[in-house]
Image (spheres, coloured by chain):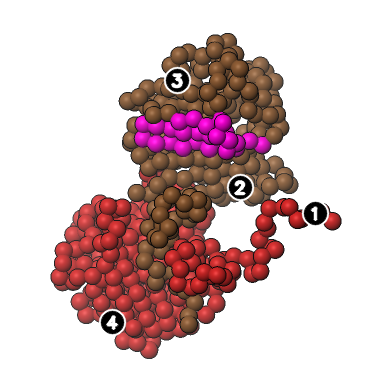
Amino acid sequence: MAIPVLGRFDEPTSIRQLTRGRGWNSELVGFLLPFARQDYIYKEYDFCETAITDDPNTDWSTDDGGATSSAVFATDANAENGTITADTGTDGDKGIALIHDSINLNANKNPGIHVVMQLDVVTELACEIGMCDALTDESLVACTDYGAADYTIGNGLAAGVFVGCDTDTQATANAQNTFTLVTEGATGGAEGVILDGVTTTAVWPALAATDFDVVVQAFEDGGYAVWDHNQAYAKGLSTGPDADQLMRYRIFTGTRDGTAVFPTIDLIRIWQNRV
Amino acid sequence: MANTASMIPMPGRFNEPQSLRQLTRGRGFAAELTGFLIPFARQDYIYQEFDFQETAITDNPNAMWAVDNSGGAGAASFATVANAEEGTIQGDTGTTDNGGVSIVYDMISSNADKNPGMHVYMKIDDVSEAGLEIGYSDAKTDENTLAVTDTDTAALANGVTDGAFIAYDTDGTENGMVLVAGGATDTDTLAAIGDSTAASPITDTVFFNARLQVYANAAYANMDAGSNTAPDAILDAGLSVGPDADVLMRPSIVCVTRNTTAKFPVIDLIRIWRNRYA
């Protein structure tokens, strides 16, 4: 008997093949979704290449606010696991960003991102991880005030779903001392929710120089995020980007006091439905 | 020595990791899960996919392909469509009648006895007065011209001695797609993919799936619209003739215009595979 041939299976490597006789509500189906290539677009960046300019990393651009001594993301030579690190520089309120080149994410195709990264310090900084349309200045925050009741979006952002923090605005308003899921869309406007649901006594989930996981999942008029795969730090919103407001992935870090912050990224995984 | 008793699993401790034997152990060859995971049985299968998420078509992994056009008025080779949803590449046949565009895998390295196959998800802006072929063959004389020169009476030409194609050509009388295969041993033969008298299964600006599986002296193809709402509308055909073993081939996609209106083929996804061992 000949060994199996891929093309003889019905709709090979599709969601229909994966779920045949198994159903959709299965951990194995969830585990294997990225490999249902006919129905899902999935790509990962593990930064094991010699340089950040090597493919596949050329899908991304680095943006530098131009602060004193700032440096864009670059490969850490001989780093365990392969990582990239940037330097926000020492000018307060400036930052650096890693942004996907193509602005091609439609919320109606459920784009998502998973990032494993760390920050050398977790005080006096701003950070945004997720997806949004093009900003006026990619090296500045998009959420300019977490303290306001409706969250204040600026910097040209019209559509987005991201996890963010900003020690400047969180500390001075509602003491939202943690990371927040923020969404923005033409129909729903800006909205936000703190990941652990606690406003004044939240525990800061990020530890200095310690890897953390962030998953951000966008929907049409909705968003969801989870920190460290811990459901105690997971929230969803029923407002978000409209369909056809195209977005791209973006990871931003800025300093808020003139002490350089060094974000290090180990892994980025991105996905969206094909149809 | 580190205590490994409580560590998470590691591939190297399994017997023949990522092999077909590991995948089918306790599961068998015929399981759907086996079929789904075949691409990841790296020991036994070569599998590559091109989703065109990259910034430019010159970025890897796309550098494995060569793009070209026939040089007609306005013709343009396949290039990345900036900010396109899902990531796509697009070509322009130009306005010269019978002018075409092609995307051709660089290496002529696929042996029919290792069951090469491909899956393409694409669309054409205007399927009237157009020709398209998706398939495996040895090198063509002109890669921007169809090798299937007749979709009514099977004929492989343009320098091709061995190949298998999913073909569409409005210059012929066949309404839809056909599977054409032949080789040094087998006479070129044709079969309609689905119902040859039905309306064309491809329509303007609508993505469709086309899948081709090649064997030594045989071929199989199927296609369907890309919509999740019509999962059962699959058309297929098989032939017991095809390319000979040991005549190396490569995958290619060619689109031509059959009048003086430019056609713009858009490709979202190409997947190619073959067995590592015969």
User: Which segment is the magenta one?
Assistant: A211-236
* Type of amino acid under label 3: Ile
Instruction: Tell whether label 2 touches label 1 (CB within 8 Å).
Output: no
Residue A231 locus on image (x, y percent) = 55, 34
Question: Residue B3's mark?
Answer: 1
Q: Secondary structure at mark 2?
A: loop
Reply above or below: B80 against B275. above
Residue B276 locus on image (x, y percent) = 54, 73
**Image point 32% across, 80% down: which residue?**
B239
Q: Note whether residue B152 is visible.
A: yes
Q: Secondary structure at mark 1?
A: loop
Q: Which chain is brown?
A: A
Main secondary-structure element of the magenta-colored stretch: strand
From the image, state whether disc 4 or disc 2 is nearer to you: 2
Alpha-carbon distance for marks 2 and 3?
A: 31 Å
Asked if badges 4 and 2 are on one and the same chain, I answer no
Whichever of labels 4 and 1 marks the residue nearer the N terminus, that label is: 1
Asked if badges 3 and 4 are on one and the same chain, I answer no
Read off the residue under disc 4.
Answer: B189
**Image point 64% across, 42% down: which residue?**
A266
* Type of amino acid under label 4: Thr
* Type of amino acid under label 1: Asn
Question: Residue A46's mark?
Answer: 2
Whichever of labels 2 and 3 marks the residue nearer the N terminus, that label is: 2
What chain letter is assigned to the residue under label 4?
B
* Type of amino acid under label 2: Asp
From the image, state whether disc 1 or disc 2 is nearer to you: 1
Instruction: Tell whether label 4 touches label 3 (CB within 8 Å).
Output: no
